[in-house]
Amino acid sequence: MTHADALRAELSRAARTLGAPDDVSPILERPRDPSFGDWATNLAMTLAKPLGKKPRDIAEALIAAMDKASVGVTAAEIAGPGFLNFRLDPGFQARGLLTILESPDTFGRLDIGHGERVVVEFVSANPTGPLHVGHGRQAALGDAISTLLEYTGWKVDREFYYNDAGAQIANLAKSTQAQVRAIGGAPLEIPEGGYHGDYIREIAERYVVDHPEDAACDDLAAMQAFAVAALRHEQDLDMQAFGVKFDTYYLESSLYTDGSVNKTVDGLKQSGHTYEEEGALFLRTTDFGDDKDRVMKKSAAKGGDYTYFVPDVAYHVTKWDRGYHRAINVQGADHHSTITRVRAGLQALAIGIPKGYPDYVLHQMVTVMKGGEEVKISKRAGSYVTVRDLIDEVGRDAVRYFYLMRKGDSQLVFDVDLARSQSEENPVYYVQMAHARMCGIFRVGEIDATTVTGEGVDLGVLTEPAEQELVKQLLDFPATVKGAADTLEPHRIAAWLLETARAGHTWYHKHHVLGEPEAITRARLVLARATQLGIAAGLRILGLSAPERM
């Protein structure tokens, strides 16, 4: 139990003695101005109506009813209309650091999911080219969200859904065929909507070597299979370079071959939520909140194909059937309209899938800047910047952090020059340097950091403001993890890391650890070790390394 949990529990107990409901749940926040204290709550104001009393009177009664010493409260003050501000004994608060030293591998971990299964689907790119920077943002978000869920007790499977069916794959095959024929001396004629990158030429060259029997260059099915396999391998290498591993790969094409799409369409027809109009099959998505009904199957005159959301519905039925009663999709903001359609299809089937399934995390576009100018194309991909380009430019850690330092639904400007710089302006460098500095204290002092346990150490000497601020930052980590996991917002961890690094650097510059009186040195070694472990935990959630030297 964290100190915040203990204080919250004591407030709840005191409130119940005043007649508050049994389920009273106080909200604790850090005051914006540290001079107001260590914790603040509006509990007295929320109890005014149920108790029929003035908030300030309730606040006074709460203070009187609390066992303040049991939770380290040295002073409780009433502010404004009834806010309660609490000041804590420095030593009592600092003793929370011992939980970090005792169990560094479990620091910040919670058991909210209770081992329940959840599938997080992300990247899920068409195998038509190398992964672009938008896919990279998905990869960073999906992987960090997965780790956050693991930290909070869920059994997570990371899934990559290969869109290996449809018009884009057909265009990939035709583009490969055009390049194969060009190698044989024919004019290069890329079809409309086809792919022009150098990587298509590379695939065509390998196909010619591997398939000498196709001298006429007319085995389009073989070219499609070859190109898809080559690009799936390419994307796997992209993700390996990014440090992302998937537990499951699911092929869109399998939904057609195993009959899942047809079964889903039959189920939707039987539900009574479909109708035909001008030769096309519609789903009444307006029955489930959509602004208009959607075409499920085009008319014969328009090709008679299923529209893209139909296999998506079938795919999510498989997720449910595979035991994933929670599913999270990380996708680009251009998939916004997909949410209503997929959920409408799942509800129309009436097979027990709850409303709001699956959850979606949508992200905005990424703009890459270098030398003050926008970078729009890759030498290899031809029309866009690839994930591998960024990794080659600035390294995996910088790419991951920059992708995660902003909320997913905000536009992201990726400044290559900033990401490469070794300065305090570069946030990932700044955070990792804070970790390295804490490691350096032990290296200079020739102290094995793992021997610092805090046993017999008087942490009450950590009274300096910079020390108290750093202690509070570290002890807020579990609550930050919970908040980030609940909202599926890993940028909260990135923000915590930056604030903790800032507090760590400030403390490091203001106060010496080594060469001080023994009691102070021992206490500050505990704080340095806790900071090292705390920052490492935050970096681990984001998939970043924690270097010991910089």
Image: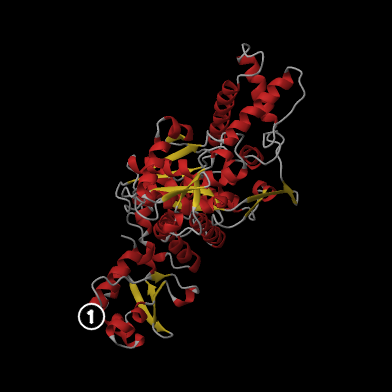
Q: Front-most of 513 and 115? A: 115
Place of residue 262 in the rendered image (x, y in percent of width and height, measured from the top left): 41, 37
The residue under label 1 is 19
Q: Nearer the viewer, residue 549 or 220?
A: 220
> What's the coloring here?
secondary structure
Asked if residue 82 is positioned above or below residue 28 in the image, the reply reads below
For the point 69% across and 25% down, the residue is 178
Residue at (57% x, 60% y) in the render: 509
Residue plotted at (42% across, 52% down):
343
Relative vertical location of residue 255 with respect to residue 409 in this rendering, above or below: above
Rendered location of residue 367, percent (x, y): 66, 50
Q: Amino acid at mark 1?
A: Gly
Where residue 519 sits, quadrant-wise, is: bottom left
Residue 529 visible (yes or no):
no
Residue at the farthest top position = 213
Residue at 47%, 67% (x, y): give it: 464
Residue 474 left/right relative to 227: left
Q: Residues within 10 Å of mark 1 (few under 14, many from 20)?
A: few
Q: Secondary structure at mark 1?
A: loop
Residue 68 pos. (x, y %): 29, 75
Q: To which quarter of the image does residue 176 belong?
A: top right
